Image (spheres, grey):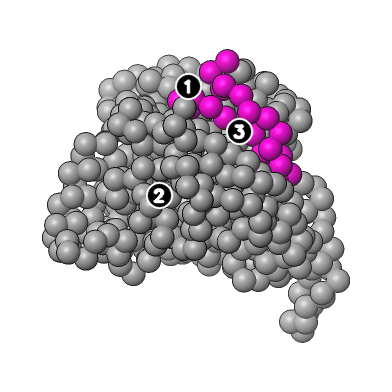
Amino acid sequence: MTLRLELVAVSKQYPAVKANDRVSLRVATGEIHAVLGENGAGKSTLMKIIYGAVRPDEGEIRWNGERVQVASPAEARKLGISMVYQHFSLFDTLTAAENVWLGLDKTLTLADVTARIRKVAGEYGLEVDPLRPVHTLSVGERQRVEIVRALLMAPRLLILDEPTSVLTPQAVQTLFVTLRKLASEGCSILYISHKLDEIRALCHHCTVLRGGKVTGEVDPSKQTNASLSRLMIGAEPPQLQHRESTPGAVVLAVRGLSLAKEDPFGTALDAVTFDVRAGEVVGIAGVSGNGQQELMAAISGEDRRAPVGSIQLFDRDIARASPRKRRDGGLHFVPEERLGRGAVPTLSLAQNTLLTRTRAVGAAGWLRIGDITALAESLIRRFNVKAGGPGSAAKSLSGGNLQKFIVGREIDAAPKLLVVSQPTWGVDVGAAAQIRGELLALRDNGCAVLVVSEELDELFEICDRLVVIACGRVSPSVPTARATVEQIGEWMSGLWTGAAEASAANA
């Protein structure tokens, strides 16, 4: 077996935690190698060490059998290492093509790069508009830009951190074909994912981390989801208790909501109509970039251009109400972007509670620091957030642990309507089960829950009804029990006319 990459006893210590503890890893040429572990297990730190973004405290890195010092991502790219981060490294004010151009040989013109992006994106089924500014892209669209950028560099080792978290089932299968083709051509792939079915179907070998240490190496094709879960978190994730609901009164009513796009690259909303009732979970499925961002902005109050009467909360018109007025009425919102919107990266967890929770603010505007700290501590305990404490900066947490904190912050507020976008993006199986269980518990206590997710398995697991959004239009709703993955996949292309109406009529 020819080794492309070998790590020998690599360690990295941070002030509050030892992220990697004498980790050894061997990746063969042309191998698709999974790295599995719960949130905070040290996976992302290890990948950043390989990519030169983090310097290890001790240990060796060997590349094609020779010891190397990877001092920077630029040096990693010279070796032939490319990485797609879970938290993207794109400049918001530049176009997708300009972002890709930054990391390529400057003998290429921007026009050359734009043409190559279109070619590679078309070959691999990754829809990317190279001329769009990054700030106009959804999370899923940004992820596609990152993947295309990595593929353009013709890597010998490709590191993918949660690459399918916001891709449709069809796009996932297309990506798998691409990765298998790359591996057959000699490219090694390090694949981080919490989707155990994907790891078992795609990967040749799997290294499991827990608490920064290697706890096992297995052939994932010979494992079950349960056995991989036990290796990763020491137990199988709890089974969700999804009882049939009896919905109550309409909490959120969206009626004929049409909105012109504010950005030239955005999506206009076209006569969007649906309800969410007390005691039910309604899911919105769709490929990213089809109006989800615009719809969430209109419902949360970030975009207050909605026509009068088009958005109602408990029969009260909130179409042009401020976000605070909506929160006062019981509407809480979890955005898809954790850092920058769900949390301020440089502020502590305690300070981040103040973004949507103001009970610790006195009448004269004075902050009750003890109350703020106590709230953060309770959220850390209740939602099993791995952090150094309430004083830890939001950016110091792993993606999954920050997600648990943000979702927990809004659930703990006892909302009457919770709107959540991509609730378990990049979250391990144990944490995902916990978040989904909390959402169902909210529903069972009478809360109305609206979930936007590109994880169809997640929507089918927790939702009572589903609607699909495509090109700014929303399909009629269908009971989840009567829907199929194939049907929803077709509707995500906008193909619901007639079939959807017949399904709705029979509901």
Q: Residues within 10 Å of mark 3 (few under 14, many from 20)?
A: many
Counting the numbered discs, the total is 3
Q: Position of residue 48 (x, y in %)?
A: 53, 54
Whether the magenta-drawn stretch holds residue 206 is answered as yes
Q: To which quarter of the image does residue 463 belong?
A: top right
Element under disc 1: helix
**What residue is shown with label 3?**
207
Q: To which quarter of the image does residue 109 belong?
A: bottom left
Point out the stretch of residues depicted in magenta. Answer: 202-222
The residues bearing labels 1 and 3 have C-alpha atoms spaced at a distance of 15 Å
**What residue is shown with label 1?**
201
Q: Is residue 424 above or below residue 52?
A: above
Element under disc 2: strand
Q: In the image, is 12 to the left or to the right of 138?
A: right
Q: Residue shown at 48%/17% (left/top)?
A: 482
The residues bearing labels 2 and 1 have C-alpha atoms spaced at a distance of 24 Å
**What residue is shown with label 2?**
81
Q: Residue shown at 53%/18% (left/top)?
A: 221
Q: Position of residue 266 (x, y in %)?
A: 30, 56
Residue 3 seen in render: yes
Q: In the image, is 327 to the left or to the right of 457?
A: right
Disc nearer the start of the sequence (2/1): 2
Element under disc 3: strand
Q: Amino acid at mark 2?
A: Ile
Frontmost residue, 305 versus 262: 262
Q: Residue shown at 54%/36% (left/top)?
A: 26
Frontmost residue, 29 versus 293: 29
Q: Amino acid at mark 1?
A: Ala
Q: Amino acid at mark 3?
A: Thr
